[in-house]
Amino acid sequence: MTVDVQFASEKENAPASIDIVTWVGRTLEAAGHASAVEISVRVVDAAEMQLLNKEFREQDKPTNVLSFPVGVFDGLPGDADVPLGDIVICAAVVADEAEQQGKAIADHWAHMVVHGTLHLLGFDHERDDDAAKMEKLEIQIMTAHGVANPYGESPQEN
């Protein structure tokens, strides 16, 4: 597994690169995905996230996490890591949400990394049944590693 972590934000609340890599690895393992993958994680400020969210989701505001899956990628050598895509996380939004929701900042960061990685693996929350599957796996990953259920006492019913 190769995880390229980039810091493009002056916010001091971002976890260390090794913590981000650890949560990506835990997510891949829990989802049963081969570890020979390549992922980029970019930590950005609100202005950059707002631009990305506007361009790719037509929402003119910053958001917590965006994922950009690569899709099918043919022609790589057999020993090359398979590129899964990019995850972009907004440090300011993560900090604000953690405070508003009464969560430890490190726990909320872990959740955003898990959530973004699952999106790269094809999970989504557009339909209720898909959201339930994704949330169940998020809760499983988080609680298995000592982090409280990010959705509260029980999985969110959509």
Image (tube, grey):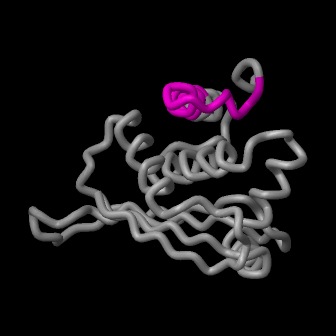
Residue 54 located left or right of residue 112:
right
Q: Is residue 23 above or below residue 17?
A: above
* Residue 66 sits above or below residue 76 on the image: above
Residue 46 location, x and y as percent? Answer: 78, 74
Which image quadrant: the N terminus? bottom left
Is the residue 105 above or below the residue 78 in the image?
Answer: above
The residue depicted at 23 percent of the width and 55 percent of the height is: 36
Horizontal side of residue 2 vs 143, given as left or right? left
Residue closest to the far top: 154
Percent across and percent down for residue 35 are 27, 49
Residue at the (50%, 66%) spot, across then down:
41
Residue reaching furthest right? 100
Vertically, is 56 above or below 25? below
Q: Nearer the viewer, residue 33 or 107?
A: 107
Magenta stretch bounds: 136-152
Q: How many marks?
A: 0
Taking the spot 71% from the left edge, 80% from the top edge, the residue there is 48
Measured from the top left, where is residue 138 in percent x and y? 57, 34
Residue for point 38% across, 61% down? 84
User: In x, y percent, where is residue 31?
Assistant: 40, 36
128 or 43: which is nearer to us? 43
Residue 3 placement: quadrant: bottom left
Query: Does residue 126 appear to the left or right of 7 in the view shown?
Result: right
Task: Tell me: 100 left or right of 98.
Answer: right
Looking at the figure, which quarter contains the C terminus? Answer: top right
Residue 146 lies in the magenta-colored region:
yes
